[in-house]
Amino acid sequence: MLNPLRHLDFDADDVTSSRESDFLRQLALSYHELYATGLTIVGNRDDADDVIQEVCVVLWQKYDEFEAGTNFRKWAYTVTYNVAKAIARKRRRRRGFGLSDYALMKVAQVKTGGNGLFELQCEVLRECLEKLPERDREFLSDCYRNSPSLVKYARDIGRSVETIYTRLKRLRKRLTACVARSLGREDSL
Amino acid sequence: MSEFPSLHDEIRALADAVFDGRIDSQRMQRLESLIVHDMGCMQAYVERMTFHGELLQGAEERTPEQATIAVLKEFSRAVRLRERHNWMMQFWAYSAMAATVLLIVGSAYLLTDGFQGAPLGVVSSLSENVQSESSATDLGRVVRLKELLEIKSGIVSLQLPNVMVDVLGPATVRLENSSRITLKSGIVKARISEGGEGFVITTPDAEIVDLGTEFLVRYDAESGTDVSVRQGRARASLLNWGGKPTKILELTDHRSATFQKTSQVAKEVDFQAHMFAPIDRSRGGIHSIDGTIRTATRKYVALFGGQVQTPNHMLVIPELQNVELHADLTVNGVEGPVHVPAGSVISSYLMHYDPTAAVTVAPRGAVTFFDRVTAVLVDADALRQTDPVLGLPGVQFESADFRQFERDEDVVQISRDRRTVSFYCGLNPGEFLDEARILVLSSPISPAQRP
């Protein structure tokens, strides 16, 4: 297989051609949304990381086929959905259970259709986070950063996994309630 | 009866279990059934996953650009490796051998120090009153990837690749990698040498990227982050909770700015020169110290014998810095008579050793400067002659001859490159005080450009 990036080292300083910098700029603008879409479909961080890696590579490999001036986001979203679905299927086969293709399709539809609403909810969530004491924010941040290996994280900080999950559950509940209150609804996120 | 007050609570619990990797087959079936048959549940599930996605991305330390580049670099490397597959096969035997060696070394490593992060730099200088939660107070100790340094008091200097970092306690700093640190509280000053550009200091409020400079960052949870650039240029970005930049200020020579994430304030303020003072007072142009020498952190008003005792170390006290001599200076140095012409720009450092009578071990150590040492003065006459010219204003010095280094038992040496001065002090009962003055010729180039 030929390396499509053989002439690149992909350090920011080395991204000199306009084609490469266009690609990076557009991908960076959509990155979070693509990651969130991948996560919603596959459900966990490990798989979401795999999805976004695969998506970046596929988009770059097929970037020649992308017509300048058309909707990069929409194109990238389609690629993300297909990659995420394939990874979710693979995991389902390996584990013996998982959401059906039909459920995954519905999840993707709801995610795309409700993007505006989700964006608002995320904004409110960020405000709610600011209201948490710093130590709780740091704890949450550490937990999510270490989410694929919370067991190891618990061991590193000398706590039991259950203690970590109990605190995490309490904080998630608090944030959920805060978001719901801010949006003026009983139930949210 | 269900353990959940509502279906949405149940969906959230199931979604959390999916995200945390704690879901089993039975609960997955329940989730499938709920979201496929009830649109409200489907909406709640997607909302919950969006919630996790937001928290996950808020905890991510890389920007989207950095993440994208990292992914593509990884891919590029993987493809290159695949292309070299055949070539690699020829080295299979060597790899197997290397793996065996690694296994042996790894086992030995586990039995000794356990796993540690990669080395990033060393502790290159300590002030006299350093107290630390970690073991950062060992001069010359290797500091490692992801290490957390908690300095309770004093100044600890770290030499990282092309970057000198001074941490002024009380402060907590995490070493993310060789070009990035996180300041959790306190003050950090960074001095960048050529090749160190792009060094990053992150606080909860801001991310400061060096563009070839000497700058200082102070953070505390209440007042936020202050950034001061003394020389060169730095780009400081205000961050939101998710760690994304929302406002960027570019700061140049003698400019300061303040950042506060909660109020999303990022504004330029008067240059805060005083913030540099404690570190300048301690470090001046000292590159590193070695052995039982410590830099000073206090302002001394009297240095008579018995006044400032240094039981276990020698003190190096930066005196007047970058002073232009208005008249020729001719004095006796450790290498013989020294003539420094008028117009020369000199920085002065006083070595002060005044142990208690109980001390039985003489200190030895070395001080290395960024610039070249012109002379080291050890005679009482030379010290008295230069006290008013190069000593700090208002400081009272010992006038008796015993302040001088005893040539027969104290040893002072200047290295061949004239950047390092080594000391060995003897113990002469009754005349413990030993002082020397080091004159360093200030370089015309900026500190930021120094090696």
Image (cartoon, helix red, strand yellow):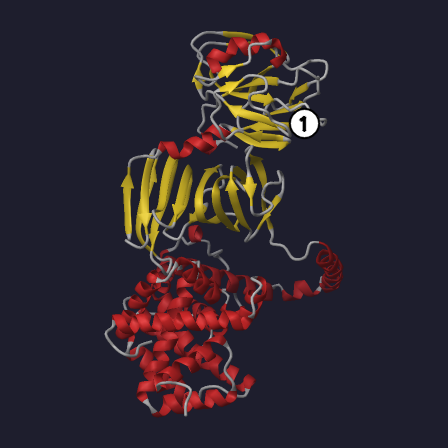
On the question of residue A68 being in view, the answer is no
Residue B310 position within the rendered picture, expressed as x and y whole percent measured from the top left: 60, 26
Q: Is residue B74 above or below residue B330?
A: below
Q: Estimate the x, y position of residue A189 in percent, counting from the top left.
A: 33, 76
Task: Count all numbered tags in the image, as a single digit.
Answer: 1
Direction from residue B422 to residue B276 in the image, left or right: left
Q: Position of residue B31 (x, y in %)?
A: 42, 87
User: Disc 1 sits on a residue from what chain?
Assistant: B
| Residue displayed at 50% across by 19% down | B302
Residue position marked by numbered label 1 in the rendering:
B364
In the image, B141: left or right of B167?
right
In the visual, does B246 lie left or right of B307?
left
Q: Which of the pair B376/B391 is nearer the observer?
A: B391
Q: Dot 1: what SS? A: strand
Identify the residue shown where x is 54% and y is 33%.
B127
Note whether B430 is above or below A67 in the view shown: above
